[in-house]
Image (tube, rainbow, N blue to C red):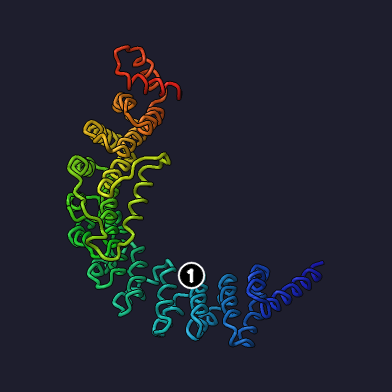
Amino acid sequence: MGHGSSRAASVNLEQAIANLHSGDFHTRWETVKPIESQGAAAIAPLLHLLQTEPTDWELHWFIARLLGNIGHPSTIPTLITLLTHSIHTDVTAMAAIALTHFGELAIAPLIDTLAHTPTRLLSVQALAQIRHPDVVAPLIQVVQDPVAPIRAVAIEALSHFHHDTAIASLLLEALQDQDATVRQAAVMGLGFQAKSAPTANHWVPQIQPLLWDLYPKVGQQAAIALGRIGTEAAIAALCHVLQSPHTPLGLQAEAVRALARIGTISALEGLQAYLTSPNPTSTDSTSTKPASDQSNDQAAVILDFALPDSSPSPAVDSSSLGHLEAIAVLGRVEGHEAQVKATEILLERLQTHDEQKIRERQAIALSLGQLEQLAALEPLIHLLADRQDSVRFHAIAALKQLAPELSKQRLEQFAQDSELEPALQSGIQIALAEW
């Protein structure tokens, strides 16, 4: 029976190799799994196909993919040859991907290919995917490469190695790179390293200027990095962004999220100052920054993220979206002290709300419900008198989330008061009907 199975497997492999050789793309795709299942037995016929069909680039692409998935070390030289000598970019790209499957075994052969200029970027990308200490030295060698994408890939990969002080120095130096993608990779990497670096607070003066980078994504990553550093200096830098009249909407939102992520009292006081002052953001990134023609899309994303509500409501101008985001993130802070402070900020905002800002009242109700602080119970009940149905329903949802049984008791007590204003009486009756 064993011999019969071997013969059947041999026949199946021969047929799969024949289909791979002469089939169309779909047929070839269907043969991948049957060939892979044969493991090392498939290597010899695959290498034979490479020799007999030197011009079929699609076949070479499939063979490179198969060799990587089979993962036998003996095929590394073949994949290196495909990487450095194939004239088709799809094949070289697949060979690079396949080599990453071999992990540490592929590092030395890939280092040898770095001198091959046409595929140097692919080699660096492959090394970057191998999370092993041995890739650090070759990646450091290319952080000054004249090709910006190579520098960016190397910087991004190095940022994942947290135990080498030299790497942090390289990332800080890369903040000054002329290419925006490199600066973005560097500041993102510093953000990754912030929690494990005892000197991260010293990075703030070097990161802070990038908040005003000409390229919005760099500034947004700078805000995220400062949020991960989380020191008083980082908080001050983020608060300065929120008080500037020139802050693009995307950066404003990231600064708000960063302060909420820090979650200390001083960080929340920064959000409080932002909410209690006139919204300073009178311009968005379309008027002052290049490469930001998606600001309207950003505004829509921020609004949807802050308020997952499908009910019709008036449009919100972009100058209010930062405040909406701040209100939304306050509802998600963690820790009792932070939640108490966030509740205080939101209740203060509710007392001074603009009657025209329907979305803001909805957002405040939603966040107060998420915080589950009893100090918000009666203010939410009084919000049931709002003239807008959508606001009242947000208040009801918040009361149910905050403390459903206690909320119901207080609503029933309020309902007994014949001197309540009619709007509140009506709202309370609607709320009780929802329990």
Q: What amino acid does circle 1 point to? A: Gly
The answer to whether residue 174 shows anywhere in this view is: yes
Q: Quadrant of residue 182?
A: bottom left
Estimate the x, y position of residue 112 in percent, counting from the top left.
42, 82
Q: Judge from the rendering whether residue 374 lies leftward or rightward of residue 108; answer left or right.
A: left
Vertical side of 107 occupied by 218: above or below: above
Q: In which quarter of the image is residue 380?
A: top left
Vertical side of 250 occupied by 145: above or below: below
> Which of the pair 200/255 is nearer the observer?
255
Estimate the x, y position of residue 115 in percent, counting from the top left.
39, 85
Estimate the x, y position of residue 293 in percent, counting from the top left.
32, 62
Q: How many marks?
A: 1
Circle 1: is it few (<14), some (14-19), or many (20+) Cα within 10 Å?
A: some
Find numbered disc 1 in the image and state the secondary structure of the residue it sits on. helix
> Which of the pair 409/39 is nearer the observer?
409
Q: Name the residue under label 1.
A: 103
> Which of the pair 130/298 is nearer the observer?
298
Q: In which quarter of the image is residue 3?
A: bottom right
Vertical side of 359 occupied by 1: above or below: below
The answer to whether residue 198 shows anywhere in this view is: no
Residue at point 32% right, 74% down?
A: 151
Residue at point 32% right, 28% down?
A: 386
Estimate the x, y position of residue 418 in percent, counting from the top left.
32, 11
Q: Judge from the rendering whether residue 395 lies leftward or rightward of residue 7; answer left or right.
A: left
Instruction: State which quarter of the image contains the C terminus.
Output: top left
Instruction: State which quarter of the image contains the N terminus.
Output: bottom right
> Which of the pair 384/33 is nearer the observer?
384
